[in-house]
Amino acid sequence: MATKKFNKKIEKRREKNWREIPIGGMITEPGNSKNYKTGSWRTFRPITDFSKCIHCMQCWIVCPDDAIIVKNKKKIKTDLNFCKGCGLCAEVCPVKCIEMRLESEFEKKVKGKNEKRYKTYETIDRN
Ligand code: SF4
Ligand code: SF4
């Protein structure tokens, strides 16, 4: 009797095997990455000084998130909805006009009974 109870307890604690866990991590449609805004993962935010930018597109080539927006062969902004703040763009920029700044610098303080800090999710950097 005691063994039956013990076995039940063990069964409850047992990790599910691969046949029992729910199916996850599936890509159900192509091109759906646009639906997942990865900008909230960011610790550092790239800030571009457009007065120094020579529009060489090095940042556009290396950006893993396609977050560098180009118009008429010129960089016009960074899409902060998708930029994860990896800093590759700042690393390759030949004129060093991209500065990686701590995301916390852009947090807004909301005053009230329970004072809180909120991140600002602006969609673009300076342009
Ligand atoms: S790498 Fe630098 S100079 Fe070149 S387009 Fe990007 S920001 Fe401008
Ligand atoms: S930091 Fe630069 S390279 Fe990295 S995701 Fe953001 S824009 Fe792209």
Image: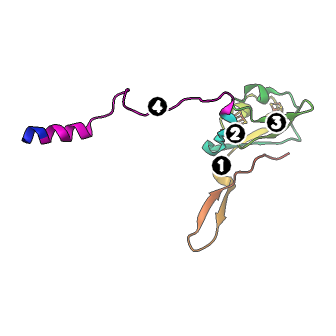
Residue located beneath label 3 in the image: 69
Residue that mark 1 sits on: 103
- The answer to which of marks 4 and 3 sits earlier in the sequence is 4
Whether ligand 2 has any atom under 8 Å from the Cβ at mark 2 is answered as yes
Using residue 119 as the reference point, say whether residue 58 is left or right of it: right
Q: Which image quarter: residue 11?
A: top left
**Mark pair 2, 4: CA separation:** 27 Å
Q: Nearer the viewer, mark 2 or mark 1?
A: 2
Q: Residues within 10 Å of mark 3 (few under 14, many from 20)?
A: some
Q: Does 111 appear above or below 9? A: below
Magenta residues (range): 5-32
Amino acid on which the number 1 mark rests in the picture: Glu
Residue sitting nearer the eye, 92 or 16: 16
Counting residues from the N terminus, which is met first, the one under dot 2 or under dot 4?
Answer: 4
Image-quadrant location for residue 99: top right
Write down the residue under mark 4.
23
Q: What residue does disc 2 label?
A: 82
Q: For the residues marked 2 and 3, what is the alpha-carbon distance in whole angstroms? A: 11 Å
Q: Is residue 27 magenta?
A: yes
Chain-order first, disc 2 or disc 1 = 2
Question: Residue 21 appears at what percent x and percent y?
Answer: 39, 32
> Real-space Cα distance between discs 4 and 3?
36 Å
Residue at position x 65%, y 35% from top? 86
For the point 70% across and 32% down, the residue is 65
Q: Ligand 1 shows up in which quadrant of the image?
A: top right
Circle 1 — which element? helix
